[in-house]
Each structure stands twice: as structure tokens, then as C-alpha cells.
Image (cartoon, rainbow, N blue to C red):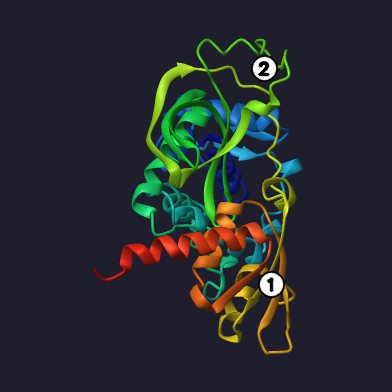
Amino acid sequence: MKIDRLIGILSILLQEEKTTAPELAERFEVSRRTINRDIEDLCKAGIPVKTSQGTGGGISIMDGYRMDRTILTSKDMQMILAGLRSLDSVSGSRYYGQLMEKIQTGSSEFISGRDSMLIDLSSWYKGSLAPKIEVIQSATENRHLLEFKYYAPSGESNRTIEPYYLIFRWSSWYVWGRKVSGGDLSCADRSGTERCSDQENYRLFKLNRMDRVVETEKDFICRNAPMPDLSNEKIFPGRIKVKALFTPDVKWRLVEEFGPHCFSEADDGRLLFSADYTDMDNLVTWFMTFGAKAEVLEPVEARRIIRRNAEETLQIYMED
């Protein structure tokens, strides 16, 4: 993506006295024209890049304004590489790996010792996840509408959105976009300024629920899209007050999922659990994964649903 390339070019200019457009074009696998546009963008951003023609010429940061290359310490470089390595874990290509190699070029004096932080953002679904991320990144950068089939608790549907952000949160990947219906591209003027209030049309879509993800050839006008509110209170409002008793041998699960302060020890040795929950279906499903190791006290409705599910399951597995 362009922003990654700009960061990479800036890093090279900080580490090297001088480089050339052909060298940058070869490193980043783009045309010289693209590199020239990137240099113009860096200048517009206030980075004093100068170019000189002829023998011994090239691209560099102006001497009188040159930033000390040691602005990036060894720890800084380790953190940057850890971040790039985490993105490489879900990349469908070698892009981030190549970017790491480019940043490391000429920077060996800043990188000492072995890696102390390893981040893997992939999942069991890496095989299907990486291609989706690549398509979404491309559609977002090119300002193309994104089409996909979506599987939600309410049913299956075909969706078209304007993609704005790829988000990793709550151990899953999401795309933040604006839902589009037929002819619904008139809510922004040429500057991208909203002319109508449609904030409710923006929402998160979970990548693992998406199928047949396609970048279309249809352009959309980039809007001043609102940033998603990713607070737990917004996404997971605690509307359901829960109380339950758990056997001590599942304490590790409660600590892992809700923290060490979500329970107290009852008189009979069991763990008295208290929390707020968002969705009744998810709550029931979660409790049933504990089997007989959990007893729901509140809400009463959850007890009724679990009892009914248990009776229906028993009917399936009863011997003839």
C-alpha cells in the first residue's frame, strides 16, 4: 500500500546518504513515475527531500535539515519489525517480509540480539483469511466497492460496502465500511463531505463470516467516514446481568475470559461468578460448553433455555 511505501522510502533516506529513483523503483517494485510522485508527497508532508541530476546525483534529505539517523534506536527498530512481522503472519504475499528486508538494509547497527517479541495475527482460518485481507486492502486503496456474501445470526445476505478500515480486535479481523444500496452513492459531494446523516449505515463485518469477497470495478467517492467506536461498552453493551456457580477445576477458563476478579468462592467451594453479558444466545452457548460444571442462577430465562436444550439433546442421543 502507498503509506507503507512512503514509510519505507523515508526509512531508506534516513539510513542512507543518497539513493536514486531507479533503485527505489526496483526495491519497491513500482515504476519510476510512481517513485517521483511519492517523493512529491513526502515534500508536501514537510520532509525536505532534494533531488539532483547527473553523475553522482540522486535523492536525499537536505543536509541542513537532516534528521539524525539514530532517531531510531535498536528498541525502536525491534518494535517496527515486530509490527511488520505480525502483519506478515496474515499476508497472502511476501510484501511485508520484503518491506522488513528493505528497512533492515543498512540498519544492522541498530538491530542487535535476538527477537524478544513475536506476534502472530493469523488463526486457524489463515488459508482463507489472507486472501480476504489482500482483496479488502486493494479495494480500500483503490476506492472500489466491495461485494461479498455474509453469514449473520439473522441469516445469509449479499452485501456491497465502501471499505474504509481493516481492524484486528477481540482476536478476530473485521472490515469497517458503509453499506451501499442501489444508486446509493449520492450522499457525498466531490470533496467527500457528507450531505446527509447516514452514520447508522457504517458497521463492522467479521471476515470469518464473509465469503466470495470480490473487489468490483465500481468506484466510490471517499467520505469523511467516522472512526469506529471499538470500546467494549459500545460493541458489547452489558444488558444481561449474569450469576452462576462453577466447579473449581474451570477457574482457569473464567480467569482467561473474564479476569481473576469475576468470581468469589462460595461456601460449598464452588466459584460464584458475576458479569454483564450482551446476547442471550451467546450466553447460553457459552454456558453449555461447561456441561455439568456450571449452574446458571440468573437470569431465569437462561436456565429455562439451557434446560430445554438439554432435554432436546437428550432425546437425540437416547437409545432406541
Q: Residue 259 carries which label?
A: 1
Instruction: Give the quarter of the image for residue 88.
Output: bottom left
Task: Give the secondary structure at mark 2.
Answer: loop
Residue at 62%, 49% in the rendered image: 14
Q: Where is residue 291 in the image (x, y as percent from the top left)?
A: 49, 73
- For label 2, count other residues whose C-alpha is less than 10 Å away and answer few (under 14), some (14-19) or many (20+): some
* Residue 128 left/right relative to 193: left
Return the residue found at the far front. 320
Mark identifier at residue 33: none
3D distance between C-alphas at marks 2 and 1: 43 Å
Give amino acid for label 2.
Gly
Q: In this view, does 69 lie to the left or right of 219?
A: right
Q: Taking 20 as reference, is 107 above or below it?
A: below
Mark 2 against mark 1, which lies toward the viewer?
1
Q: Which of 62 and 73 is in front in this view?
A: 73
Q: Say which amino acid is labelled 1.
A: Gly
Say the numbered circle drawn on residue 192.
2
**Residue drawn at (69%, 39%), measured in percent from left and top?**
62
Q: Where is residue 240 in the image (x, y as percent from the top left)?
A: 71, 55
Residue occupying image coordinates x 68% and y 50%: 236
